Amino acid sequence: MTHHHRGAALVELALILPLLLLLTFITTEFGRAVYQYNTIAKSMRDAVRYLSVQTPGTRMTEARNLVVFGNTAGTGTPLALGLNLTHVANPTWQVVGSNPVINTVSITVQGYTFRPLFASVIGVNFGNFNFSDISATMRAPGP
């Protein structure tokens, strides 16, 4: 009786393998998207922290380089695939109040598009998708 079931496991594997591969690739690409988002968010916090101790309106190029490349010189490869300086809006400073004066600085990444490693798997198109604006704001230390 067992020789009638020979090959059944192979057929079952052939039937389920595409679904397992699809789930694996979806999970991998979702993980990459979250990782890239977190990388950009962390670099934005670093740039805002850097600007918070600078004179308002200065060091904007260095801060933009810090967001994209992870260093103020703007050297090396971008931290996220496809991220460039055009995605980083100029930082803005805001002064509120009179006693005490609250000075904040904000920086934003706009229009960044996540690009998956695989355009499609087993006929399922992953496609590119745009992140919403990613921003960070920090209060400058008081006098």
Image: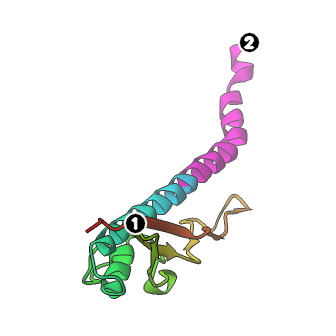
The residue under the point 45% across, 58% down is 38
**Residue 39, x across and y down, in percent:** 41, 62
Q: Would you place residue 122 above or below residue 99 in this image?
A: above
Position of residue 78 in the picture relative to residue 7 (left or right): left
Mark identifier at residue 127: none
Position of residue 116 in the picture relative to residue 19 (left or right): left
**Residue 101, x across and y down, in percent:** 39, 69
For the record, the magenta segment spans 1-28
Image quadrant where residue 58 sits: bottom left
The residue under the point 64% across, 43% down is 20
Disc 2 crowd, CA 10 A, few/some/many (<14, 14-19, 20+): few
Depth check: give the residue in front, 5 or 141: 141
Depth check: give the residue in front, 38 or 91: 91
Q: Secondary structure at mark 1?
A: loop
Disc 1 crowd, CA 10 A, few/some/many (<14, 14-19, 20+): few
**Residue 25, x across and y down, in percent:** 58, 53
Residue 78 in view here: no
Quarter of the image where the C terminus is located: bottom left
User: Which residue bears the numbered disc 1?
Assistant: 99
The type of residue carrying mark 1 is Asn
Q: Would you place residue 1 above or below residue 70 in this image?
A: above
User: Which residue bears the numbered disc 2?
Assistant: 1
The residue under the point 43% across, 85% down is 85
Residue 117 in view here: yes
Quarter of the image where the N terminus is located: top right
Q: Would you place residue 99 above or below residue 5 in this image?
A: below
